[in-house]
Image (spheres, rainbow, N blue to C red):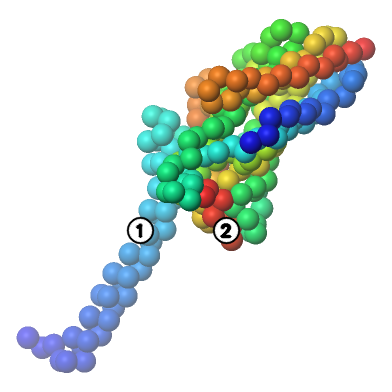
Amino acid sequence: MGLTRREMLMAGGVGSAALSSAFLASGLAGAHDETAEFVARHTGRKATESDRVHLIMPAVFPTGYTVPMDLKVDSPMTEDDHVKRIRVFAPQNPLIDVASFNFVPQRSIARVSTRIRLAKPQYVVAVAEMSDGALLMTKTWVDVATNGCI
Amino acid sequence: MTTPTPRVLVPSGATKGEVFQVRTIISHQMETGLRHDVQGRVIPRKIINRFVCRYGGVEVFSVDLHEAVSANPFIEFYLLAMESGRLEFIWEEDGGSTYRLEHQLAVA
């Protein structure tokens, strides 16, 4: 074996660097998959992330008791193409269901505002159920300073 | 707990085909069932669990509310003006009580 101590150390260093970057990458991918998995578990189906769903919430809010939430889905709301329902989840709350909004084509617009409770900083998730059966989702990070669920 | 009082803000009139805003609020504790009293007993859940809006007798918008909707639930939504008619707003509470409001909308 022609390996010197220096070569051994170098190889080890490179190896561990590769290992930790692999860990980082899987960690990030994991965070993304976590939301998708969460949605699949609670809706029974796979949802696609879509920029047609807009969940507008403050990035930072002082209290978790009344966090404003604006929700909108780009949709013509015709008989053939409309939003049936939007479900909102707070995955880090003790009870994850927030609300579900039901719309009627040609009568209501897929847009709603309310105020919600959040227990801790987290991604709030909105899942829109379209008339063709597709599930479209989006998530928004909200940092709250106090627990609004106690 | 005081008696929940619902309030709505709706335009009195709209033109046909116009989208109009409806703002509703009901004074309500929205007791989550997660809190304990001083003796350590769970305070039972009591929330508004459903809100329905009917327009001319037809359901046009509804919400299923869970524990994570804030106290004094505020809901703002948008409807399409079709014909003159009555708007009904119904809040359903755990235990079966309901609270109602009505509004006459004139569509020109």
Left or right: residue A44 compared with residue B64: left
Residue farthest bottom in this picture: A5
The disc label shown at residue A146, or none? 2
Q: Are marks 2 and 1 in contact (CB under 8 Å)?
A: no
Q: Report whether residue B73 is seen.
A: no
Seen at 74% across and 15% down, the residue is B88
Helix, strand or loop for disc 1: helix
Which secondary structure lies at badge 2? Answer: loop
Name the residue located 15 percent from the left edge and 91 percent from the top edge: A4
Counting from the top left corner in percent of width and height, residue A70 is at 68, 41
Q: Are marks 2 and 1 on the same chain?
A: yes
Q: Of residues A9 and A129, which is closer to you in this image?
A: A129
Q: Which of the numbered marks, if any, corresponds to residue A6?
A: none
Q: Position of residue A2 (x, y in %)?
A: 10, 88
Given the image, on which type of amino acid does mark 1 rest? Ser
Can you identify the residue that label 1 sits on? A26
